[in-house]
Image (tube, rainbow, N blue to C red):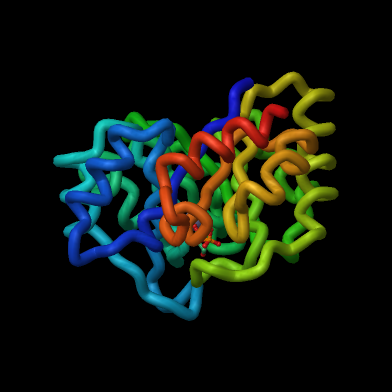
Amino acid sequence: MKPIIAPSILSANFADLKTEIEWINESQADWFHVDVMDGVFVPNISFGFPVMEVLKKYAKKPLDVHLMIVEPDKYIERFANAGAHIITVHLEACTHLHRTIQLIKQHGCKAGVAINPHTPVDLLADILQDLDLVLIMSVNPGFGGQAFIEQTYSKVRKLNALKSESQYEFIIEVDGGVSDQNINKLYQAGVNAFVAGNAIFKAENPSTLIIKMKESASQ
Ligand code: DX5
Ligand code: ZN
C-alpha cells in the first residue's frame, strides 16, 4: 500500500485557513488530519465545529478527524454531518468502545481507534475486526511539535503482526513527531498513514516536503 500523508491542521495558520486548505488541495497530501481537543481528555483545547465547517466547504480530500475528547458518542452525529470521513476515538476515552464504533459506522463514516503511548496494542485484539483504522500515538496527545517516542516502532510491528495473522484490512496510522527523518523506518514497520503537523507546516516548502516524505517512505 502506498503511504498516505495527512497534514495536521493544528499546525496551520488559522488567520489564513482557506489558503492553507487550498495548497493542501493542490498538493500530494491524501487527507486532512483534524485534531479536536476538549481540555479534559487532553490538557489543551483546539477547535471544533466552526473549523470543521470551513474544512467541509473548501477541502477536496477526506477529513481524518481525531477526537481527543471524553464521551465522544455525544458528538459523533455532528462530526459526521460536519463532513468527517474518518472518525477516530481514543480507546482510553471509551467505556463502551464497540458501541461507539458502531455509532460511527451508522453515521456513514470510517471508524478508527487511537491509543496513547502507554496503551498496549493487545488491548485492541477484540475490536480489530470492526475497525477501518488504528492510530498509534507517537507522542502524548495534546500538542503539536513534540518529540517522537521511539517505543512506537515496536508497537507498530506488533500491531502489524496481529493484522497479518488475522488478515483484517485496517489502516495503521501514526501521529506525533513524524517527519521525513523517521518515515522510512515507520513504513518498513507497517505504517500506512502518516500524520504530520510541524514537519510539514514549518517546512520551507510544505508541498515539496510531502513529496519527499512519500519518496523517503517507500525508498
Ligand atoms: C497531537 C495531535 C497531532 C499533532 C501532530 O495531539 O494529535 O496530530 O498535531 O503534530 P506534530 O506532527 O507536530 O507532532
Ligand atoms: Zn492527531
Q: Please state, as top left, top right, bottom left or bottom right, where the C terminus lies in the image.
A: top right
Compared with residue 81, is residue 192 higher up or lower down, i.e. above or below?
above
Task: In this rendered view, identify the residue nearer to me: 156 or 197.
Answer: 197
Q: Is residue 84 above or below residue 52?
A: above
Residue 111 shows in this picture: yes
Give the answer, above or below, for where 216 lies relative to 144: above
Residue 156 screen position, x and y as percent: 76, 44
In the rendered image, the vertical position of residue 3 relative to residue 121, given as above or below: above
Q: Quadrant of the N terminus?
A: top right
Outermost residue, front direction? 204
Q: Residue at x 49, y 61 (%)?
A: 198
Does residue 83 appear left or right of residue 172 in this picture?
left
Res. 130 in view: no
Q: Looking at the image, which residue is at 28% across and 42% down?
A: 23
- Give the residue displayed 34% in from the left and 48% down from the top: 76
Where residue 189 sits: x, y (%)?
A: 79, 37
The x, y position of residue 2, in whole percent, is 60, 23
Give me the residue at 72% from left, 39% from top: 184
In the image, residue 32 lies at what x, y percent? 37, 43
